[in-house]
Image: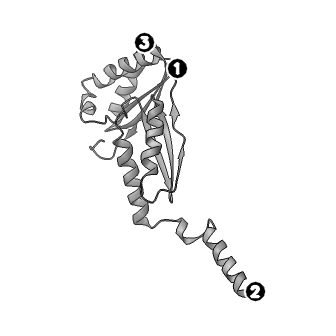
Amino acid sequence: MIKRYAILLFALSLSSPFALSQQPSADTAARITKEVRHELLMLPYFSVFDNLAYKVDGYNVTLLGQVTRPTLKSDAENVVKRIEGVEHVDNQIEVLPASPADDRIRRQLYGAIYGDPMLQKYAMGVQQPIRIIVRNGNVTLEGTVDNEADKNVANIRASSVPGTFKVTNNLQISNTQAHL
């Protein structure tokens, strides 16, 4: 009887959320975080008009952000699920509504921001660091820039595009000169 009780208690401790195996080592957590970032950046239809973010908590990954294509939402979840060590993916990515007016605003915003001589340096490379999110005429700028002046210029340029109702500037000042 005592032996059965001990075996049952041991089995319950393995399924407990407090079991030691629930938290990865620091190296494993760093590897998972690095691989999630890499896999998301490598998605073939990830563009400047999409914003992907994530949180890693143990072996669980929460996907956040906004995308223009429903397939990008499912693609992001699928690539993260395949990462070794990831046990659960909570996909909270929002698919932006399809809108010809928003598409026009996106194109104009891209030209206004990345065409500005002060901001052209951010247009180099595959993944531009200033993300342009448009939802029903409301614009959100996400990502990183080198300094406060660049952040302000991006905001001014975005505000100058006809058809935009409101611009929310969430750009962060980077500590380094390197961009994605």
Q: Which residue is mark 1?
A: 136
Q: Nearer the viewer, mark 2 or mark 3?
A: 2
**Residue designated by label 3:** 162
Q: Quadrant of the N terminus?
A: bottom right
Residue at 33% over, 47% down: 175
> Position of 129 compared to 21: left or right?
left
Which of labels 1 and 3 is toward the front? 1
Q: Earlier in the sequence, mark 2 or mark 3?
A: 2
Mark 1 surroundings within 10 Å by alpha-carbon count, few (fewer than 14), some (14 through 19), many (20 or more): some
Q: Earlier in the sequence, mark 1 or mark 3?
A: 1
Q: Secondary structure at mark 2?
A: loop
* Left or right, residue 35 beside residue 93: left
Residue marked by disc 2: 1
State whether residue 9 appears in this view. yes
Name the residue at the bottom extreme: 2
Q: How many marks?
A: 3
**Residue 170 shows in this picture:** no
Of residue 84 and residue 126, the one placed in the foreground of this image is 84
* Residue 69 point in image, percent of width and height: 45, 29
Q: Is residue 180 above or below residue 22?
A: above
How far from the left and from the top, in percent, is residue 163?
Answer: 46, 13
- Alpha carbon separation for disc pair 1 and 3: 13 Å
Residue drawn at (35%, 42%) of the image: 41
Q: Amino acid at mark 2?
A: Met
The quarter of the rendered structure image containing the C terminus is top left
N-term mark: 2 or 1: 2
**Marks 2 and 3, how far apart at CA:** 78 Å
Q: Position of residue 33 (x, y in %)?
A: 41, 54
Query: Residue 147: x, y in percent?
Result: 33, 37
Marks 2 and 1, how far apart at CA: 66 Å
User: Which element carries disc 1, helix, strand or loop?
Assistant: loop
